[in-house]
Image (cartoon, rainbow, N blue to C red):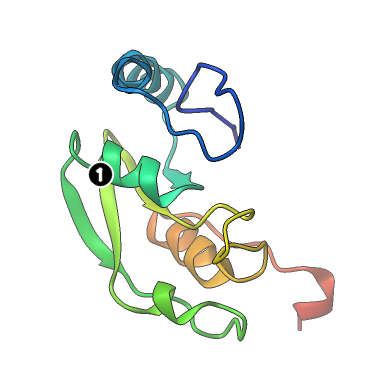
Amino acid sequence: MAHHEYIQDWLPRPGVRPDENMWKKAKPIFKDVVVELKPKCVLFVCKRVYDRVSQDFPSSTSLIVDESHPLTLDIYKIPHSTLQIDGALASWIYHPSSHQGGFQRPRGIVSSLIEAAGGKVCLPSSQRN
């Protein structure tokens, strides 16, 4: 698991969007990180960043969302878009600080993305048989 900030510049305060130069500067850095780390899946924790990155990579098959997580938002249950970024399957969730965010609401997306990329979801001991 790795974490990468797509926009490399500090923004002056919350709610300020990156300018065009910041987006241009971020693109080759992100591509280098993907080439170096060779992830199987990429989760964008911001729909706006995902939408911007999606202009540079081909779409892939929509996720079939695991609806067994009762808190998963309905907006995640419609055909959920994915991208193919080199060998990685990529999708998005809302940032936890957004009005639609939160840490439990996107669980159906996260587990579905991991499984679609060929990984295995580890359940907490309280959910194991």
Above-or-below relation of 89 to 37? below
Q: Nearer the viewer, residue 77 or 127?
A: 77
**Res 21 → quadrant:** top left
Q: Residue at x 50, y 18 (%)?
A: 8
**Res 13 → quadrant:** top right
On the rendered structure, is 67 left or right of 3?
A: left
Q: Of the residues shown, which amino acid type is indicated by label 1? A: Gln
Q: Residue at x 67, y 62 (%)?
A: 103
Q: Position of residue 83 (x, y in %)?
A: 26, 48
Count the numbered circles shown.
1
Q: Where is mark 1, residue-wise? A: 84
Q: Position of residue 90 (x, y in %)?
A: 36, 47
Above-or-below relation of 33 to 71? above
Q: The N terminus lies in which quarter of the figure?
A: top right
Q: Position of residue 76 (x, y in %)?
A: 42, 72
Q: Nearer the viewer, residue 60 or 47?
A: 47
Q: Residue at x 76, y 84 (%)?
A: 129
Q: Position of residue 80 (x, y in %)?
A: 32, 67
Q: Residue at x 19, y 38 (%)?
A: 57
SS for tag 1? Answer: strand
On the rendered structure, is 23 left or right of 109?
A: left
Count residues near mark 1 (Cα–Cα under 10 Å), then give few for <14, some for 14-19, many for 20+.
Answer: some
